[in-house]
Image: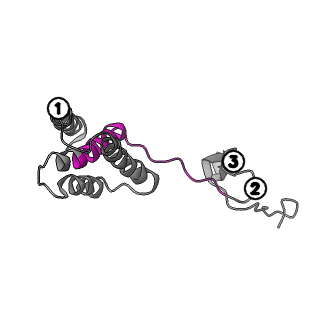
Amino acid sequence: MTVADGGLQVLGPRRISAVVQIKLFPALGFSLTIALAGPAALSAQEGQAIAPPPVIAPFDADLQRLAEIFGALHHLRAVCGADEGQKWRQEMQALIDVEAPSGERRARIVAAFNRGYRDFQQSYRTCTRSAEVAIRRYLAEGAKIARDMTGRYGN
């Protein structure tokens, strides 16, 4: 079907970037609705749709920082003999479950937890005075982030 014979030519899957309704002959009630595909709706290869931009909540930076703190605490508390088992990993899982991130967003949060864990795993193989200071600071920072997020975005 082509435009010449009164039809439309379909060029492949496109993302709709705008819908425009034009009133033709308003007295008769005719209107035309047009769906527009934006210039960024297709990739370089015709017919291949571009993935939508990642979902970013206004508190994602705080959430990622909290995940990083959980990762650091998961390692540091174990090294310093806290005998908490998987507490901080479970806190992280609860955070993911509540927030229900998926795809790229979930991956960023998990990467932050792993980064916090790995950074301190490389630095602290035994409990030292500086490890204990880091634990206290991270507990305080994590509590502050949680309070601030709850106050700002909580129900």
- 2 or 3: tag closer to the N-terminus: 3
The image's mark for residue 45 is 2
Q: Cα distance, mark 2 to mark 3? A: 36 Å
What's the amino acid at mark 3? Leu
Q: Nearer the viewer, residue 70 or 102?
A: 70
How dense is the environment of label 2, judged by Cα within 10 Å: few (below 14), some, or many (20 and up)?
Answer: few
What's the amino acid at mark 2? Gln
Q: Residue farthest to the right? A: 4
Residue 146 vertical placement versus 85 (above, below): above
Left or right of residue 142, residue 67 in this image? right
The residue at which mark 3 appears reads as 24
Residue at screen point 15% across, 34% down: 136
Give the mark toward the camera: 2 or 3: 2
Residue 98 vertical placement versus 151 (above, below): below
> Is residue 66 magenta-colored?
yes
What's the amino acid at mark 1? Val
Q: Are marks 1 and 3 in contact (CB under 8 Å)?
A: no
Give the mark toward the camera: 1 or 3: 1
Q: Secondary structure at mark 1?
A: helix
The residue at which mark 1 appears reads as 133
Give the mark toward the camera: 2 or 1: 1
Q: Which residues are magenta?
A: 49-75
Residue at screen point 82% across, 62% down: 6
Q: Nearer the viewer, residue 73 or 90?
A: 73
Q: Are marks 2 and 1 in contact (CB under 8 Å)?
A: no
